Image (spheres, helix red, strand yellow):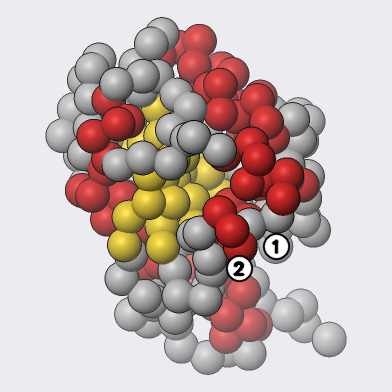
């Protein structure tokens, strides 16, 4: 589906180390539930809040491209992987907001990432740049009474429904149900390091890329 200038555009950032079906379902279910014209995937170059990814940025970018191939609603943004400095979400969102004008933008994230938002760089400014689309996952609270106090205060009056995302460029929060999938990038890395099969946990073109480039394997002699 081609991006339009009026329907909200979804944004999905992450290290994608490696990309897997959990990422793809979050993007697809968020797109459908929130009425998004499409989802732009944004692989991080140098994530500042965690250890360096196991796979180089160029590999993670290519895996993301292979994962979304065939879905016209998905595109990949390579700017963070090309940048020399840390990949701060707010900086990327400032760039995308400048490109989008007043078109609604929706940053998709899991509820677990949302609860950690106060640790992000200039996190309060994110609400001026995008809406948030939260994937409801078991075990993570979507009730403001259970959020960190500063997060609950910053989100006061922002909770709404999917329809609210079309009414303004940014500033609202809407949640959507996501099919529970017990897949994580850390699980996949551990299985790959152990030489175990990851078939059917991620797209076959991604698995083939990992195999051909011998990614996530423990170096010989260790």
Which of these two is toward me, 116 or 200?
Answer: 116
Residue 101, which numbered label?
none
| Residue underneath mark 2 | 215
- Quarter-of-image position of residue 82: top right
185 left or right of 151 in image: left
48 left or right of 94 in image: right
| Residue underneath mark 1 | 54
112 left or right of 64 in image: right
**Quadrant showing the N terminus:** top left
Label pair 2/1, CB-CB below 8 angstroms: yes
Distance from disc 2 to disc 1, alpha carbons, whole Å, reads: 8 Å
- In percent of width and height, residue 96 lies at 49, 20
- In percent of width and height, residue 10 lies at 36, 36
Density class for disc 2 (Cα within 10 Å; few <14, some 14-19, many ≥20) is some
Q: Residue at x 56, y 38 (%)?
A: 156
- Quarter-of-image position of residue 213: bottom right
Q: Residue at x 43, y 33 (%)?
A: 172
């Amino acid at each position: 589906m081609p991006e339009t200038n009026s329907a909200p555009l979804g944004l999905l950032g992450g290290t994608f180390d490696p990309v897997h079906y959990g990422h793809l379902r979050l993007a697809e279910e968020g797109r459908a539930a929130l009425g998004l014209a499409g989802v732009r995937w944004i692989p991080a170059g140098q994530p500042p809040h965690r250890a360096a990814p196991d796979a180089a940025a160029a590999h993670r970018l290519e895996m993301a491209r292979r994962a979304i191939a065939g879905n016209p609603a998905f595109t990949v943004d390579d700017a963070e992987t090309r940048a020399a400095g840390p990949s701060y979400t707010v900086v990327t969102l400032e760039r995308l907001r400048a490109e989008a004008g007043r078109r609604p933008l929706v940053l998709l994230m899991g509820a677990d990432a949302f609860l950690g938002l106060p640790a992000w760089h200039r996190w309060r400014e994110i609400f001026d740049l995008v809406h948030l689309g939260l994937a409801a996952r078991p075990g993570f609270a979507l009730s403001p009474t259970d959020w960190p106090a500063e997060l609950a205060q910053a989100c006061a009056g922002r909770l709404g429904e999917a329809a609210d995302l079309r009414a303004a460029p940014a500033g609202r929060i809407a949640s959507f149900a996501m099919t529970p999938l017990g897949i994580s990038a850390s699980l996949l890395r551990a299985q790959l390091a152990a030489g175990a099969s990851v078939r059917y946990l991620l797209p076959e073109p991604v698995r083939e890329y990992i195999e051909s480039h011998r990614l996530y394997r423990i170096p010989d002699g260790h």
